[in-house]
Image: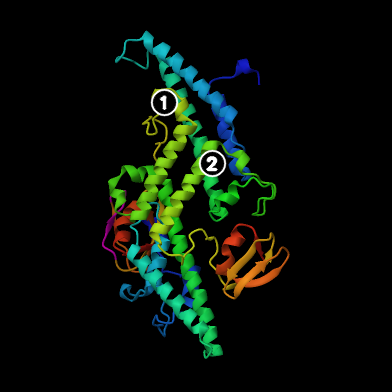
Amino acid sequence: MADWLDALNTTMAGPSFIDRVRNAAADDDVPIRDDFGPILAQDIAEETSLQQLIRHWMNERHAPDILPAQEHLLGRLLDHIRKQSDDVQLLCADPDSSEEEHFRIILVQTEVERVKFVIRSYIRTRIHKIEKYAQYISATPDMHERLSQGELEHAQRYARLLESHFMNSVLQSLPLSQRGLDDDEPLSPAMITQPDRQRAVFAHARQACPPVRLPDGSTMEMEKDQISLTPYSVIEQLLARGEVELV
Amino acid sequence: MNTNARQYGDLATQLITESRRSTSTDTLLKYNDVLVRSIIREQRQLETILEASLSKVPPNNIDPQKHPDILLYQTMISRNKRCLLAYHNHRLERLKDLFWTVGGALPLLLSTSSATPGGQPGVDVRSKLSPHEVDFLRSYSASLLTFRSGVLATEEVDLFAPISRPPKDLHVQVRVIRDCGVIQTEVGALDFKKGQRTLVRRGDVEHLIVQGYLEEV
């Protein structure tokens, strides 16, 4: 196991999306660093809301399980977008604004659209997983706290919806003994889909991480900027603490 | 195939083959009500046989090695049931995909007009659905709308807009494919007439592109 892990340990070459974000039109009230140090190597304290969102978005898209909802972050960004849109409206309406300002306005508007795209994609990714695991979520109180109120309600509605669809289309016509939606048959896959926590993910260490235990009993310690391919369950805790990100 | 040579479980296999065909050709096939009904009939038949076999042995003391028939019937019953559910679930996933590709515009999806937009002329979705599936889509759409108004509590982010490519430009050149009347845009109200080409703000017309009224040039 250690061999293939070592082979995969390379220093980070920024994925194209990160590159593009870094080169995108800057938010006018986010301080721009002169040296444009690689985003991934930045200290956590310096992370802007957008960078946080992009990190959570990528984590969410790569993780087999549903991650905790980032409601505060989303709220902050949405407020920000609203404020910027208002400012843009004001500037557009002002006849005194110069050509250069109009150019800036276009950059800001484009950036706002792109941030909206990430927010949308983030929410849709979560909806997709929530629907996939709806029955599991309804039956497992542990999952509830990871979802926002609205997401939880949607999950429960969806689980009921699925159940009533199966009941109306198939099960009600079957004999009583065959109507269960949670049969525990040997040799057949479970009827309730659960997140596959053993799925392999690429984890990038954002800082030096405490050792984690691999399934074979050995331990692994990730250095800063190290990338490893591991089962999701191994780095689950590190991810929750923000020490690694999925790439 | 000679009906006499048919064995239990064949019908369920047909049903699964249909789902597989639907995936590989990326089309929504018509809901196979006849086949579903026949399998349900087969299930009742199997249940009767199973009960008959069970009544011959003392309850609470069933040794599968001495009564392989019971195990066999039980396995067939659960296989058929799983196939039925898999077929329905597969269809629901397809319907949800369709729902999202038209940007959550349910009336558009269910409209029986033969010229369904979205680049697939002549696709009539409604006639391929079972009544329960129509109900499902309605409730699904309602649930998502509730979710949207509750969670985002804002019109800033359109949940149903496409997420396949991030927007590169603020404006987009579009060609009008179907008349869609007067639309409020950044520069005032615009009347979109078939065949026109215009440069508009993407955010203003995104939903019309998704629904197939406009086409990006």
- Residue A212 at x, y percent in the picture: 28, 57
Quadrant, the N terminus of chain B:
top right
SS at circle 2: helix
What amino acid is at disc 1?
Gln
**Residue B192 lies in what quarter of the image?**
bottom right
Extent of the magenta region? A209-217
SS at circle 1: helix
* Above or below, comparing residue A216 to residue A173 in the picture: below
**Residue B168 lies in what quarter of the image?**
bottom right
| Residue under pointer 2 | B134
What amino acid is at disc 2?
Val
Quadrant, the C terminus of chain B:
bottom right
Figure coloring: rainbow
Q: Residues within 10 Å of mark 2 (few under 14, many from 20)?
A: some
* Above or below, comparing residue A8 to residue B12 in the picture: below
| Residue under pointer 1 | A178
Pinpoint the chain carrying mark 1: A
Which of the two marks, 2 or 1, is nearer to us in this view? 2
Please give left or right for residue A26 compared with residue B180 in the image.
Answer: left
Please give left or right for residue A36 compared with residue B184 in the image.
Answer: left
Please give left or right for residue A15 compared with residue B67 in the image.
Answer: right
Residue at horizontal 69%, vertical 59%?
B178
Same subunit, labels 2 and 1: the answer reads no
Please give left or right for residue B166 compared with residue A162 in the image.
Answer: right
Q: Residue furthest top?
A: B56
